[in-house]
Amino acid sequence: MVIGKRIYHPLFCAALISSVLVYGRIVPVKDRHAFSSLIPQSDIVSMSGKLVSNPVKSERTGFYSAEFASDVAVSKCGAKSSCRGRLAVCIDEKTVEAYFPGKLYSASYGKGAVLCESGARLFLSGRTGKNGVFFVSKAESLGREKSFAGKLAHIRALSRLQFRRLMYAWGGAGGLLLALLSASREYTEAALSAAFRNAGLSHILALSGMHLSLVSGIALFAGMRLFGKTKSYIFQFCAVSIFVWFAGFSPSLLRAFLCSVLLLLCSVCGIAGADTVLILCAAFCLHALIAPAHILSAAFMLSYGALLGILLFSETLNIFLIRALPKKLSAPLAASLGAQALTAPVTLSLFGTFMPVGIVATALVSPLITVFIYAGIVCIALSLALPFFAPFTGAMMNAIYGLIKLFVLFFARAPYVRIVS
C-alpha cells in the first residue's frame, strides 16, 4: 500500500488534519503581520521602515513587489503615527535597478540611488492603491542598522549585487544561473522565461529542494574530504544555511531547508532509513507554525504537492514504466508523473491551465539543469580564484545553456489544457 501504516502515525495525522482544516476553509489562517496604524491606510503618503523580502519583478508590469515592515507612517495632512505589521509595496524599475549592471537605470548609481534588498531601511513616498498595495514614487535610504543583524543584511545585499555582476558577464547563461541560485530573474531572457512556463517547467526556475539538495550534496562531499564524517554534518548544515540565507526564504526553499535539516538530524542521531513522507509531514507542521502566511500561496501548495506525489507514487509507477522503458528514462518519468498527480489539480484550480507536456519535459530537462548548476558552481569558484578563466567558463556555461534553451523552446510549442469559465 502507498499509505500503509503511515495513516496511523501522529505526524501524518497532524499534517492531514491541518490540510483539511486550512484548505477546507474550516479554520482561517491568521495574518501575524497584519498592518495597523492610527492613520487610515488609504491616507498614507509616506512611511519609514524596512524591506523584509527581496523585490520580485513582475513579468507583466515590469514593477517590483516586496514586503515592507513600516514603523512610522505620514498622512496627506502631515500627521504622523507609529505603526506595525507589513504591507505590500510596488517599486518601479528605476529605483530597484539603479545598482544593477547593464540595466537602463544603472547610470543613476550614486545619484540618490538605494540598494533595494531585504533588510534595507528606507523612507518611501507614494500612494496606497485600492487593493491595499503602496505604490512607491520615491525611495530614500535611511542607512543600515548598526546592529549585528543589520550588518549581516548589508553583507548579504552586497554579495547578491556582486553575484549579479558576475552573472551579467556570462550573458544568457548567467541570467539563468542567477535565477536558479538566487531567485533573481532580472537577467533571464523574457522569451525563455515564458517558454519555461508554457512547457510546464516553471517549478524548475523556482528555488526548491532540487537546488538545495545539490548544494547539500557538494557540501557533504567536501566536508567528508576536509573534516571527516563527524564534522562533515556541521559543514553541510552551515553550507545549506548560508545558501538559504543568501537566496531568501521563499515557501519552496523553506520547505526544502526544513526537510534537509530534519534528515540531517536523523543522520546525526543515527536514525537510518527515515521515512521521507513522515519527514515531509513534520516539515509541513513546522512550516505552518513558522510562516503561516505561506500556507495559502501557490508556491507552498505546489512545492509540498509535488514532493508528496513523488514520494507516494513514483516507485509504483516505475514498476509499470520499467517494463517498456530503460531504467534511466523510466525513473525520472515516474517521478514527473508522481509530481503531476498532485500538482495538476492545484494548477487547474488556481490558474485554470495544465501543461501535460511538462511530464516528459521535466524528465528530460531536469538532468540538464542539474549539470548546469553543478558546472555553474565549479565555474564560479574558478572565476573567483582565477579571474582570467572567466571568459572560458562563460563560454562553457553558454554551451550548456544553449542545449537547455533548445529543449525548453521545443516543449513550449506543445498544446496545453485550459479551463474556460
Image (tube, rainbow, N blue to C red):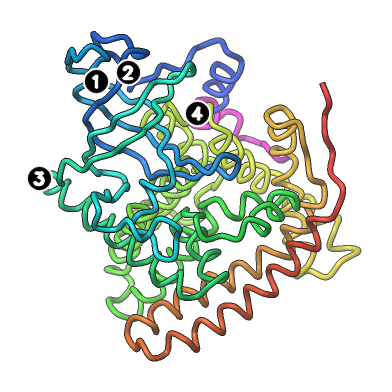
Q: What is the three-letter code of the residue carrying label 4?
A: Ile
Q: What is the three-letter code of the residue carrying label 2?
A: Phe
Q: CA distance from mark 4 to mark 2?
A: 19 Å
Q: CA distance from mark 1 to mark 3?
A: 20 Å
| Count of residue discs | 4
Q: CA distance from mark 4 to mark 1?
A: 22 Å
Give the residue displayed 44% in from the left and 46% down from the top: 93
The magenta segment? 1-14
Disc nearest the viewer among 3 and 4: 3
Query: CB atoms at circles 3 and 2 under 8 Å apart?
Result: no
Mark earlier in primary sequence (1, 2): 2
> Against 229, is 133 above or below?
above
Mark earlier in primary sequence (4, 2): 2
> Against 204, is 233 above or below?
below
Mark earlier in primary sequence (4, 1): 1
Q: CA distance from mark 3 to mark 4?
A: 31 Å
Q: CA distance from mark 3 to mark 2?
A: 25 Å
Mark number, residue 147: 3
> Against 273, is 77 above or below?
above
Give the residue displayed 42% in from the left and 49% down from the top: 257
Q: CA distance from mark 1 to mark 2?
A: 6 Å
Q: Which residue is mark 2?
A: 35
Q: Which residue is mark 1?
A: 84
Quarter occupied by residue 122: top left
Q: Which residue is mark 4?
A: 295
The secondary structure that most of the magenta stretch takes on is helix
